[in-house]
Each structure stands twice: as structure tokens, then as C-alpha cells.
Image (cartoon, helix red, strand yellow):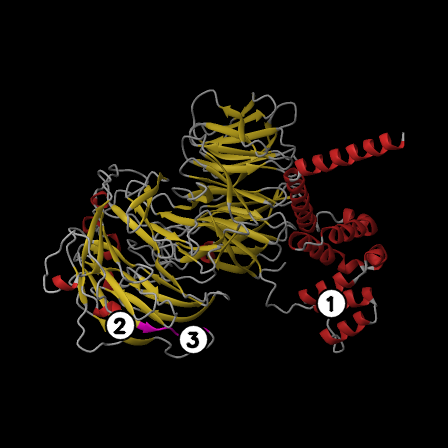
Amino acid sequence: MKSNYKFSNLCGTVYKQGNVIFTPDGNSILSPVGNRVSAFDLVNNKSRTFAFENRRNVTALALSPDSNILVSVDEDGRALLVNFRRGTVLHHFNLKRPVNDIQFSPNGKFITVTHDAHIQVWRTPNHLLREFAPFVLHRTCTGHHDDVTSITWSADSRFFISTSRDMTARLYTLDPLEDYRPKTFAGHRDVLLKAYFSKDSKIIYTISRDGAVFEWRQKPKDRAGDDSDSDENMVDADAPTGENAIALTRWGIAQRHFFNQAHTKVTCTTWHAASNLLVVGFSTGVFGLWEMPSFTNIHTLSISQEKITSVAINPSGEWLAFGAKKLGQLLVWEWQSESYVLKQQGHYFDMNTLSFSGDGQSVATGGDDGKIKVWNTNSGFCFVTFSEHTAAVSTVEFAKQGQVLFSASLDGTVRAFDLIRYRNFRTFTSPSPIQFSSLAVDPSGEIVAAGSNDSFEVFMWSVQTGKLLDVLTGHEGPISALAFSPTGNTLVSASWDKSVRLWNVFGRGARAIEPFMMNSEVLALAFRPDGKELAASTLDGQITFWDLENSRQTSVIEGRKDISGGRKVDDRVTAANSASGKSFNSLAYTADGSCLIGGGNSKYVLIYDVREGVMLKKFQISENLSLDGTEEYLDSRKVTEAGPVELIDDRGDESDLEDRLDKTLPGASKGDLSKRKYRPEARTKAVRFSPTGRSWAAASTEGLLIYSLDETIAFDPLDLDIDLTPQSVLTVLNRKEYLKALVMAFRLNEKHLIQRCFESIPPPDIRLNAGQLPILYVPNMLRFVANYLETSPHMEFGLLWANALLLAHGRHLRDRSGEFASVFRALQKGITDFQMSIARTSDDNTSTLTYLLDQSRIRREVIQMEVS
């Protein structure tokens, strides 16, 4: 089996903190998600997460006007210079201070960065070259007495204005100007958040946190010597002209405006110069649009229950993007039609579990917030959220057949959800209130079983009637895992009592076969797809394999040293000697049963070869130093007399009162964990392979991580010889020897060559070529057709190939259905995609088709009347 999986996407987390920005074309939005950056394509309804990682959580993003360079800065001020189009890191750079704002000049030649009370101006590096020291400092601007909060450039890229916590704004020039001292804009009574230039640069607006907007204009000539500010209307008489007009203007306050929002503060703002629109987000979750300079309120709406931390507007001024840090929300609002373009939110707390649907189209996740979210694997978006549970969701499971999703929760209920009508159609409960920790659904989808934490029992219900069928007793500890055999006649339960029990649930009475005893507490179970082998992980880090036909143990994998890694901030021992995080709490087989994937309370996910018992690949799910457990060695310089620096509570230093307050309950299990400061840990709660075998997913602290096979770089020929070259393949193709060219392309395993040969075959010749294709290449051909159906507009061509291949080689494929299960699922996924797109197109055009049919019928009737 191939193990060259690489990071593909991050679902389940859409926004963490920092600023959201639109791309210059206005079609996509960039959002910081932990120490990564996600791009959401609003036109094509797709999301992708870049593979590069910052050292810590990203706090500031900036994209050059030509969309070539992306700069992401983390909490420590370490920046990554990225080629945006390729997603490749060009350079690492340390700015040495936390950054509040970073901005490209409109001409893209300079980058301004806040540096405590200073502003640094850097020359923009070349995005095509890898230079030794690409960052060159142009100049450093001083003058503020407190941290700078924002920077805004003028349209001509010659001036920029900065705002600061010292309640002033200052106007600087890019290049030194003779006899020029930076102009100071004072008069506000609270921290200044932003300052903006009008389109013609004759007006400057400054916005403070207390809701005041000051409008600055050229002072009249007769009052040039008067330094007192006034609200009287000012005129632009004798205004300076030329390229230095902004610097030579004597600025004064022309108007003072106030938002007058009771008991609220301004948290973020943005400005659209072309339409003079000021967008403001407030701490109550309300945002508003004001037209300047008349200060006319156009639009006000409450979009969140928590404060809005970031706002952006696209270049056309139609879409507004909002990020809410506390809830992890990302919203895109079209204010003219008053409709959502995008509304996404991740799990509020940790993600506990995940499950792939049978066709691999969807993946469901359950979290500590009691919500179940279903994500589309192609787009990366959540399309439905179920919030019926009132406590943490412990397990979710798709039925093998049909569009049904089951979930078990600590609120004492097991629920069944209909994914066609999006409703909870069954709720299963036990005779006495207990917490359910595990769940299993039989292959037919008619029986659902759940294990309890409290009574150590397994409950079984009928899905059709909702009645409790049986209660299985015998375990002496909490039930940690349940699984039905793929053949459907055996239920396996694992418990903390160091045993695994097999139940014959469809016999005359659910009788337990003699239990398998383990050396330690059992944490997870997994069945091989053929149902003949069972894998169980225990607390001592072992994975034990059992042959169910002979009821004997076949092998053991010692995974304790493989999965251990990462030292927490408050650990007194090294990572190697730590007892925590050295076991697997989730296991899953690949579709062909040859490999096993496992994850636990550490930063690693591992893939093992089952037959050889060796580790094939180790994946580190995160390198984010903002998470606990990602470092192997701790820095002694960060240990003080009061303990580690990371655990010292610095809430009292926050600027907003609501951020300074500690609302957590003493002894609460989520929040402060009875410590002075809570840091999330890098760990994996669940891992699952996609039914297609092309990807796997992990429910981690960062969100839902998806890894896919990397076939873009690896040269993996099937049967290579010296005469087999791309040129020889094209020569054969030009002679119209289609089958020979196709086989040669498969031997080279170059995707673009395969596609070219594939699309060159005329439709009438498809059946002949499919029948003569050597059996060795049939699985590869089917998988290629499945991918082709997903990505190509030539639907009928792909369906003709799928039909011809199944007709010609159906018997061979059926006899080896287990071996080719992942290929069949990939093909099913492609055909289902096509079916859904056809159904959607037909539904959208029903009225048009009805009208055309009616017109055709009326025309025939008219012709008949004329003839008669």
C-alpha cells in the first residue's frame, strides 16, 4: 500500500484569530486557522488550507496587490514569506515583536509593519527568487508613545497614517521630506483603531474604540495660525497641490461623529474608498455601514452573539467578511441583497469523533459542544449542523446503507438523523439515565448498539421501531469501544476491565463467547474489512490482533515508543519518560485490510503494516507551539519562580474589560482545568480512512485534518524499460494505436499522459479498447475513470468507459471485490457526484422545461387545427 499521504485540507475550523482579507479579485477570502491559513473560494464554493505552518497561531495576514506574495505573522512576530499562487514558503523572517498590523503599499513595492511604538518599512522581496536576505529595511518611523494599532497607505503609495494606543494618529512619508515632521491627529478620548484616506485624499477619518469618528480636512487660510479645533464646516480653499499635497496640508477637525451604541465598543473597522463606505464591527456582535462624509447609516445588523474581531470588504464593495474569535465564526454578507454568501462555524470545544459516509462524499464530526456537523469532502464546507444533543457527543457513525447518521452522547441518548430531510427521526434511551461512550451500527442498519460509562452495560435497539431489544451485561468497567463485524453476526465490546467480549446478537439469546483477556485497559477496536481479524489497542501502548475464526491471538505491535512524543509545559519529566500519551485511542483499517492507522493523546498519527508489524509512516499533526505537547524539549529560559511563562495568567493585561474577567467556574473540566491558564493540547481523538482509500482524516485539536495521496511529484512507474518515454507514447498515439498508447501511459504512470491517451480514444472504440485492456491495468483504469468523473466536464464519455470496463471485466472484479473495494467506492463517489449535479440542474430548470414542452404541445395543436 502507498503511504505517501500529504496534508490536503483542514475542515472544522474556519477562523481562530487575526485579520481576514479578500484577494484582489474579490472572489476568495483568506482566514487564519491556528498556525495555518485557509482560502475560501466564494464563487466555486471550495475551501483549501495551505500546507505551510507558522511556529505559533497566526495573528496578521497581508497579501500583495498582484496576489503573488502572502505574508503571515504569528504571535511571536515570526513571519513567513509565501508564494501565494504556489503555496511555497520562500523565506522565514523574525520581526522580533508581536505584530498588530502589516500592510502592503498599493503599488506593492513596500511592506509596513507595526513594531511596538515604531513602524518599520521594508522593501517587498521578489516572489520568483530565493534570496539569502530578501528583507531589506527601508526606514523606521518613530513618534508614538504606545503600541501602534494600525497602518493605512494613501492611494499614491507615498504616505501612510498610523494609529496608536496613545490616542493619536500620525501621518508619515515613505521617503524623507525636507522640513517635514510627522503630523499628529489628537483629540480622541480612547484608543484609536483605524485611520483612513478618502478617495481623493482630501479627507482623513480617524475611528476610536469608544465610537467616535473624526473627520479631518484642510484648515481655511484665515485660520491657519489657530490651533484650536472646531466643528464648524471647513472649506478646501487654497489647498496644497502636487505630489506632496497630503504632507503639506494643515489638517484640522471638520466634524465629530458618534455611533451612539449603548454599552458597546468598536472592535474592528474597514473602509471602501471607491464608495465612501465605512464598515464598523462592535463588541455586541452588531455591525453597521455608514456613508461618509455625511455619516448616513445605511445598514445595521446583528450577526453574532459575541464580539466581531475582524472585518474586511471586497474590492467591489458588495461582500463583507466578518470573523468572530470566541465562536470561531466566519461570515460573508452581501449587504445590498441582505443575504449570506458564506456562514461557517467550527466546533466550539474539542472535536471528539468522526465518521465517513459509505461513498466518501461526506464526513460527520461530533464535539464537546453537543453539536454534530456534516462536511462535504470535496468543498470542505459544513452543510448541516444538528444541535439536538444537550451534552458532549462521544461517537458518530454512518449507516452502511442509506442516508442515516447515528450519534451517541453523554446526555443519555442515541439519536438517528435523516440526511435527506435533515431531521432527527429516532431517539433511543435507556431505562435509567446513563452516559453513552461508544456506538456501533450493524451492516444492515437495522440494529444500533451503545455502551455506557456508568452501568458497564451494552444496550441494543431496533432502528425501525425504536424499542430496546436487549441489554448485554458482563463487563466490570466502562465500555470504551463497540464494533459490529462486517458480516453482521457478531458484536464486539471493549472495556476498561481489560477484556474484549464477543456477542452472538442474532442467536436465540445474546450469549457471550469466552472473552479475550488483555494486559491492560482496552481503549479502541477495529475490524478488518473482511471480518476475519480484530485489532484492539490497550493503555500500555500495544495493538493486539486476534483471529476470530480460531479465537486466537496472532500478533502484537508494540507502539508505545512510536506514538509517544511531545512534552507538556508543566511536565516534570522528559517526553521519553512521560507516561501520558503513549497509547492509541482510535484505530482504523485501510479498505484492503493491509494496513492499520492509529492516533492517540500525542502529536503523532501512525500507519502500520499489519502482516509485517512494522511502522510505515509517522505523521505529525501539528507543529504549532501555541499547543501543549508539540515540543520535545522545554526551554529553561521560559521557566520563572512563578512557574512556566506560558501558564502565567495574563488576562489582567487585556485592554477590554470583558477579556479581563475570569468567568470560569472553579474545578471546571473545560476552560482553566483548575490551573492559572489553560493551553489546548496537541492530540488526536479519532482517525478514519476514507472508503475510497485515497485519504484519511483525523479529529484533532486543530480541527478535522484531511491527508490525501500525493501523486503529483512521485515518479512511480509500473513496468519501465529503456524504450518507454513520453515521446514514444505520443508517437504511438499519433499512429492511432490507442490501446497500446494507453497501456504505455499507465506503465509510465504520468497522469497528463494517461489523460491525453484516454481522451483521444473515439467513443465508438471505447467498448473494444476496454475489453482488450490487460487485466493488470483494470483497477488503475477504473480509479482513473472515477477521478475523471469528479473533475472533468465530459460526463458521458466517463460513464461510457465505466460501463464498458464493468461489462468486460465484471467477473474478475466481482471475484476480488474485497481487494478492489476502495476502487469501487471511488467509482461510486464519482457517479454519485454526476447524478447529484444532473438532478440539481434538472430541478433548477424544471419550469423552463415545462414551458418548452407546453409551447411544443400548443404548436402541434395549432398545426393540427390548420391541417384539419
User: Which three-letter amino acid code belongs to the residue tagged 2?
Assistant: Asn
* Sooner in the amino-acid sequence: mark 1 or mark 3: 3
x%, y% of residue 709? Answer: 59, 59
User: Residue 360: within the magenta?
Assistant: no
Give residue 53's position: percent from left, percent from top.
42, 61
Residue linked to disc 2: 244
Residue 38 % position (x, y): 45, 55
Looking at the image, is mark 1 or mark 2 earlier in the sequence?
A: 2
The answer to whether residue 515 of the structure is visible from this angle is: no
Q: Which mark is residue 745?
A: 1
The reply to whether callout 1 and callout 2 are in contact (CB within 8 Å) is: no
The span picked out in magenta is 122-127
Could you tell me which residue is drawn at 38 percent across and 46 percent down? 328
Residue 126 is marked as 3
- Give the image location of residue 160, x and y in percent: 28, 66
332, 205: nearer the viewer: 205
Numbered circle sitting on residue 634: none
Q: Residues within 10 Å of mark 3 (few under 14, many from 20)?
A: some
Q: Left of 258 or right of it: where is 361?
A: right
Which one is in front, 283 or 776? Answer: 283
